[in-house]
Amino acid sequence: MTGSCNDLNVLAKSPLFDEVTTGRAPHIQFQVNNKIHNLGYYLADGIYSARWATFVKSIPKTTRPKDLKFSQAQEGYRMDVERCFGILQSRFSIVRGAARGWDREDLQYIMLTCIILHNMIIEDERPDDSDEDLESDEEEENNMKPRLTTVWEGPTGVDFDPVGRDGYHFNGFMDRYFTIRCANSHSNLQEDLIDHLWNIQGDMEI
C-alpha cells in the first residue's frame, strides 16, 4: 500500500464526480469576467497535476502581479475550507478515522450527523441575540461569529434520465466525463477568475 495511496491514485478511484458524469448533479451556471461557466469547481493545491475543469489551483512561481494576487486569494479561501473541516475533525474523532472500512452511505450519515451535532453545539454556545444585535449583524457582517453549516440534500421534484448501457446514455456519460477533464476549460476558468479578481481590486482602489 505504501506509495500507491497518493492523491492522484485516490482521485482516479474517487466517486467525487460520479453525480456529474451521470447527469445527476445540480445544474450550475455562473458568470465570471463576462463569460458563462457550467461546472462547479473545487479549490485544489499543486499536488493535483490534472488540469481539470473542476479544479482551480494556485499558480506556482508567479511573475505577474495579478497572478500573485489570485494565488494569495485562492490559498486563503482554500485554507478557510480546510479549517472548517478541521473543526469537525478536532471535535469528532470518527471523522479523523480511516474511511476505507465504511460504506459510502454510512459515511454520508456519519458526516451529516457530525454536521448536525456541530450546529447544535454552535447554537447552544452562541449567546442570545437581541433585535438590536441582529440588525447590527445585517448591516455589518461579523466574520468571527460561528456560522451554521448547511447541507445540500439534492433537488426535489426532479426526474433524472436513467443511466444505462445503451448508446444514447453512454454517449452523454462520456461527454460529461471529457468535459470534466477538459484542460482548455480549466485554463479559461482560471484566467477568468484571475482577471475578475484583479478588476475587483482595481475598482475597490478607485
Image (cartoon, rainbow, N blue to C red):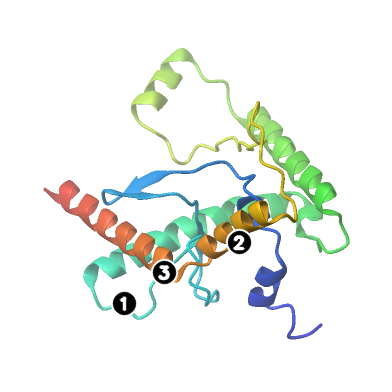
Label 1 to label 3, Cα distance in Å?
Answer: 9 Å
Give the mark nearest the N terminus, 2 or 1. 1
Q: Residues within 10 Å of mark 2 (few under 14, many from 20)?
A: few
Amino acid marked by disc 1:
Thr
**Res. 62 mark:** 1
Of badges 2 and 1, nearer the viewer stands 2
- Residue at (69, 50) in percent of width and height: 88
Label 3 to label 2, Cα distance in Å?
Answer: 28 Å
Label 3 element class: loop
Q: How many marks?
A: 3
Mark 2, residue position: 174
Label 2 to label 1, Cα distance in Å?
Answer: 35 Å
Mark 3, residue position: 58
Amino acid marked by disc 2:
Met
Q: Residues within 10 Å of mark 1 (few under 14, many from 20)?
A: few
Q: Is residue 36 left or right of residue 51?
A: left
**Res. 185 mark:** none
- Residue at (66, 52) in percent of width and height: 169
* Percent coordinates x, y for residue 117 in the rendering: 74, 37
Q: Is residue 53 left or right of residue 106?
A: left
Amino acid marked by disc 3:
Ser
Query: Quarter of the image holding residue 6?
Result: bottom right
